[in-house]
Amino acid sequence: MSEYIFKLPDLGEGMVESEIGEWFINVGDQVAEEDVVGTMMTDKAAVELSSPITGKVIKLAGEPGDIVAVGAALVVFETDGADVGAPLEARSSAVENHRAPKSAPTGPNGQKRVMTSPAIRRRAREAGIDLSAVPGSGSGGRVLRKDFDAFVGNTVGGGHARDRSESDRSHGALPHGSAPTIAPTTETKEIKVIGLRRIIAERMSTASREIPHFTYVEEIDITELDALRQHLNSKKTDQSERLTPLPFLGLALIRAVQEFPQCNATYDKERNTILQHGAVHLGIATQTPDGLKVPVVHHAEAMSVDELAREIRRVSEAARNNSIKKEELGGSTITITSLGKLGGIVSTPVINMPEVSIIGVNRAIEKPIVMNGQIAVRTMMNLSSSFDHRFVDGYDAAAMIQRVKEMLEHPATIFL
């Protein structure tokens, strides 16, 4: 017998260390070559690592949340000495990025490993669900969040419903007018801040600490825009191609920053330099099972409304199911953030560093508005946008949002 030390490889992006995201193995497990052993966190996403060798796990570098230096021991294997082969440096293929692999990897003991995100894997483990029983609709059979939720709803939820029904029949209904006794609870749940949540926390803290934010809110009448959107959607046979207000807002923003380039900019702190970008690389703040991510539509300025809509859908879904490419999670020059129907009336979005502007979209609602002395029902929506006051003056920010407002209220001008 001999030992093989699997060292943490260089994950790119100039990183010298990485955080352990999740282990898929335990000490004592027998692992085959190319089995996925766990995930490591980069600044952008979780990166799956595959074993470069067949052997028994005798030591792990630490627990999720611990930091491991590049080149330090990650996993120690016990081998029979015949499987060691080439050194780790010659086995760069052992590192898998966070895109879905071309063929499904295997887990410990050689069983087929289900492709899914670490968050879904954790939820399945906590719920006692075998992921191999969940039909996956993603690329290569990857189990997406919607697949897992549907499976839970059809099996676990249904089972619980049956249990409750049987319990009710067995014990009878509560007497009329009586209420169940609710016992007080002292339970406290501790959740370690690790992985993407730790990265989000650090970025938000840094942005809040270093950037003097100011938020500008404007109400916009999108009645005409909504009519145009519904008309265009009525011509589409593919329901998945239907347009939301977001690509129209994106186009209006692209046109507006051509007049206000100081809003489509990034700040290079090391060189103390503002970079005003001719291209618009549009960040789309996206809630995922793992936390908030900002996938990027690169060169949005060269796209039509349909092309922009397709790219927004594609990168957002790829961010949610962890099939997105690394380069699509960076390089944004300005970001749009929207909570859709949960958008509320006003928000104060935090700037996505190193950008200097973020455009927040609030919920669209019908409300009575006075127009030419008459009350009319119009579809209204607020934009709550934040700017870095070091580099964007209040006048310029307001003027830029007013330009966006003008185009959205007269949507034909977006296409001029």
Image (cartoon, rainbow, N blue to C red):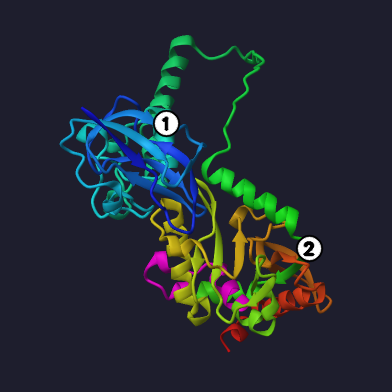
Quadrant where the N terminus lies?
top left
Residue 257, magenta (yes or no): no
Spot occupied by residue 273 in the image (x, y as percentages of width and height): 68, 73
Q: Main secondary structure of the magenta part?
A: helix
Q: Earlier in the sequence, mark 2 or mark 1?
A: 1
Q: Which residue is mark 1?
A: 157
Q: Is 240 or 258 nearer to us in this picture?
A: 258
Amino acid type of the residue that numbered disc 2 sits on in the rendered structure:
Phe
At 78% across and 68% down in the image, what residue appears? 390
Quadrant where the C terminus lies?
bottom right
The magenta-colored residue range is 233-253
Describe residue 50's horizontal placement relative to residue 368 as left or right. Answer: left
Q: Is 72 or 94 nearer to us in this picture?
A: 72
Q: Quadrant of residue 158?
A: top left
Spot occupied by residue 15 in the image (x, y as percentages of width and height): 49, 54
Q: Which residue is mark 2?
A: 214
Q: Secondary structure at mark 2?
A: strand
